[in-house]
Image (tube, rainbow, N blue to C red):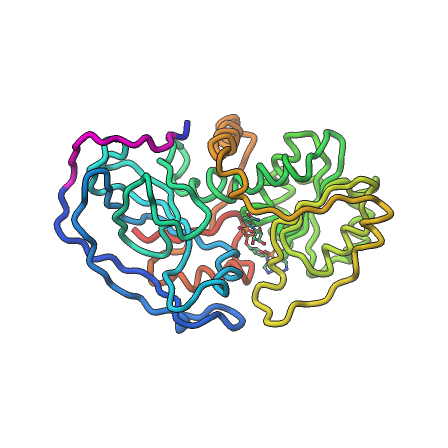
Amino acid sequence: MLFKYLYTTTRFYSGSVGKVRAQKYVLTKYFQGEPKKSDFKIVEEELPELKDGEILTEAQYLSVDPYMRAYMIGYKLPTDMIGGQIAKIIASRNKNFPVGKYVTASFGWRTHTVCNPEEPPSLGFLPLTLVPEVKPHPVSLALGVLGMPGNTAYFGLKEICRPKAGETIAITGAAGAVGSHVGQIAKILGCRVIGFAGTDEKCQYLKEIGFDHAFNYKTADIRAALKEGAPKRVDCYFDNVGGEISSTIINFMNKNGRVAVCGSISSYNDNMLPKATILQPALVFKELQIEGFLVNRWIDRWEEGVNANLNWLHEGKLQYKEKIYHGFDNMVEALVGILRGENTGKAVVKVK
Ligand SMILES: NC(=O)c1ccc[n+]([C@@H]2O[C@H](COP(=O)([O-])OP(=O)(O)OC[C@H]3O[C@@H](n4cnc5c(N)ncnc54)[C@H](OP(=O)(O)O)[C@@H]3O)[C@@H](O)[C@H]2O)c1
């Protein structure tokens, strides 16, 4: 169960840590190509004493996600770096958030945070929630299969692709946090699943977790791969990458097919948007439905997604991999790592 915050005015205090200095990443230059350490400076700040209702948290795992590369252009510089984290409550004046519990929240790339859970600072996608009991699995899953990527997979697939048993779904970025999860839910729902990922090892992993076919998009002929993997063509496409591969897949779809446009990582590091084959003929003649989405559209149903994924996890129907980077100083390396495809499954940075 995921316990959402319930506000209380009761006076409560636990944990005493004295004055705490937090470190945080501040973006001082817009990214050009791959993110660089020199685009940031690390700043220290002294945190205020806790007021009634507030908590002090210490980051344990910070998330690195592709959207971080894409979004920062929308912020005025200098700005605190956005992002989700799992943090341990180390002092509390809020009964509902006792010391020792873990929360996920969009605190950004910072080590310590003071906040009122009712009005958390929001530097990203995540609502502030207590992490559910996940043992024997690691708490870091709250940034992956039990967090934002898990809900992206759950709602994007169910609400936008709307797959029916027996249909064929194609997934790009298939070995990543979202893609590997989408494929497994689609299998649970009775679909034929084909995935595209960037190495043979990733494709092997996808077959191990139940994908019917997986192709290395860097070496395969995409159309030939589609003919082999989807002999009845594609009914649903979960698009994580954009670009030409997406045009090829969309042109290989069946009438009334559904496309969930989740992201376009193939161009996040590019200054000029690439051109790709037009989609209009396929959209018109096959009457396709193509819809972009942001996962926070389902913020009011957040628990539903987490609980569904948690149940599948407990039932052994959902498998996961994590790529764990280490150290607060290595945030930029980790972000660059996912953009280069170093990860299979969810990438997180263990900072404590
Ligand atoms: N709409 C939303 O609300 C929402 C929420 C979460 C994520 N997203 C989007 O979903 C996508 C996947 O996110 P994620 O968190 O699951 O990341 P991820 O897939 O775990 O990590 C990124 C992966 O992208 C692949 N990649 C990198 N460059 C590529 C390129 N040029 N062409 C094709 N693939 C490339 C790499 O795998 P390979 O080795 O296979 O290349 C890399 O491992 C991203 O586009 C992200 O922005 C959207």
Q: Is residue 29 above or below residue 114?
A: below
Question: How many numbered marks are there?
Answer: 0
For this orientation, the residue located farthest to the right is: 285
Whether residue 194 is visible here, answered yes or no, is yes
Say which residue appears at 50% left-offset and 60% top-offset: 71
Pick the front one: 343 or 6: 6
**In the image, is 192 to the left or to the right of 280?**
left
Find out whether residue 158 is within the magenta segment: no
**In the image, is 251 to the left or to the right of 114?**
right
Say which residue appears at 64% left-offset and 53% top-offset: 197
Find out whether residue 8 is within the magenta segment: yes
Question: Residue 15's quadrant in the figure?
Answer: top left
Which quadrant of the render holds ligand 1? bottom right
Say which residue appears at 76% left-offset and 51% top-offset: 249
Q: Quadrant of the N terminus?
A: top left
Pick the front one: 123 or 22: 123
Q: Which residues are magenta?
A: 3-15
Question: Percent from the top left, x then y, of residue 120?
Answer: 34, 45
Question: Residue 234's quadrant in the figure?
Answer: top right
Most frequent secondary structure within the magenta stretch: loop
Question: Percent from the top left, x then y, of residue 19?
Answer: 14, 53
**In the image, is 210 to the left or to the right of 111?**
right
Say which residue appears at 63% left-offset and 36% top-offset: 159
